[in-house]
Amino acid sequence: MNETISSPVFPFSALVAQAPLQQALLLAAVDPSIGGVLVSGPRGTAKSTAARALAELMPEGKFVTLPLGASEEQLIGTLDIQSALRDGGVKFSPGLLAKAHLGVLYVDEVNLLPNPLVDQLLDVAASGVNIVERDGISHRHDARFVLIGTMNPEEGELRPQLLDRFGLAVEMSNCFDASVRQRIVKARLAFDAGPDAFRARHESEQASLNQRIHAARAALSTFDFDDAVHARVSELCIAAHVDGLRADIVMLRAARALAAFESASSVGVTHVERVADAVLKHRRREAHASSPDHAERESAPRETNAGDSDWGYLPPEPAGTVKVKQVRPLAAKKA
């Protein structure tokens, strides 16, 4: 069912000390084929707040939650075979994948979902197409969304094969910096005390992000990768001892999305290095931690310190539960 969120959403641009997570989510919003974002960390680190905030920046503003007890049919949809036999046409009842199209599909505690369901989620997130087949009859539909999965490692891990299929990963942690904690709490209290006024103060930043995502999506096809970029990607992936070539492809796509988001003229090695940690964090082979090239692996740029800057990765602006929650749209034109 479609449901409009009655309470205002905390603005994405107002998130405090979450630069690595913000970057990963924005990259996935620019290019959903990156394959989704896995966010791990303890409770109370604003994982769901960030996911809902991103939905507001998406073309349709949809936020779809996949409950832990969901069935395969709830996820992918169903076909009415009797109707097809009787009328000669396919009657399709959409599932959550269809409802999440052009929005965000959020899975809390993704590590507790059955593995086959996670497989299907990741397949569709990467391809942008959902195919439902039953008794020789099939139906396909577009399903381009940003998949955001969250998990608390203390409650169990994902199989390495599934970890590898998430495009990007960010690890959240408890904050023990007093000044940063105070900024986070003050922002939350200000929002709770007057959400409309708080949102109004961030309206221009929100509109800018919305427009930049839209422009970056349109510009993706204009970018190419030169030999230096390919060489750096290979170097980083080899040093991390990743399995297969998925990491290389995701790293190129993430670097391209970052270049497009920042309105760069081309994809550069610096773009690769700035996305490397999110691409490799969940793919590094720990068995090689003591190998001679471990130091080289660690040369990949690390995440921005949470206390350094909320927007350290963004350039200055140029002058001049089966619930589909509809987030209140932005004032700016939609993508």
Image (cartoon, grey):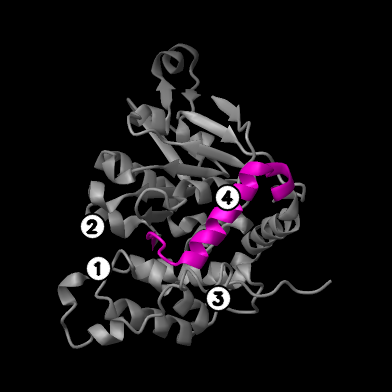
Q: Quadrant of the N terminus?
A: top right
Q: Is residue 113 visible?
A: yes
Q: Which residue is mark 1?
A: 243
Q: Mark 2 = which residue?
A: 160
Asked if the residue under mark 3 is in contact with the one under mark 2, i.e. CB atoms within 8 Å, the reply is: no
Say if 161 sits above or below 85 in the image.
Answer: below
For the residues labelled 2 and 3, the Cα–Cα distance comes to: 31 Å
User: Does 301 lie within the magenta span?
Assistant: no
Q: Amino acid at mark 3?
A: Asp
Earlier sequence position, callout 3 versus callout 1:
3
Is residue 181 within the magenta segment?
yes
Query: Mark 2 belongs to which amino acid?
Result: Pro
Q: What residue does disc 3 label?
A: 224
Considering only vertical position in the picture, is 194 above or below 138?
Answer: below
251 w.r.t. 101: above or below: below
Tell me how far mark 3 sits from mark 1, CA to CA: 25 Å
Q: Which residue is mark 4?
A: 188
Q: CA distance from mark 2 to mark 1?
A: 10 Å
Q: Mark 1 Cα within 10 Å, few/some/many (few <14, many 20+)? A: some
Q: CA distance from mark 3 to mark 4?
A: 41 Å
* Residues at marks 2 and 1 touching, judged by CB atoms closer than 8 Å: yes
Quadrant of the image occupied by residue 273: bottom left
**Lower position in the chain sequence, tag 2 or tag 1:** 2
Q: Are marks 1 and 4 in contact (CB under 8 Å)?
A: no
Marks 3 and 1 close (CB-CB < 8 Å): no
Image point (39%, 55%), residue name: 39
Give the secondary structure at mark 2.
helix
Image quarter of residue 321: top left
Q: Label 1's element?
A: loop
For residue 50, side relative to residue 66 (left or right)? right
Segment colored magenta: 170-198
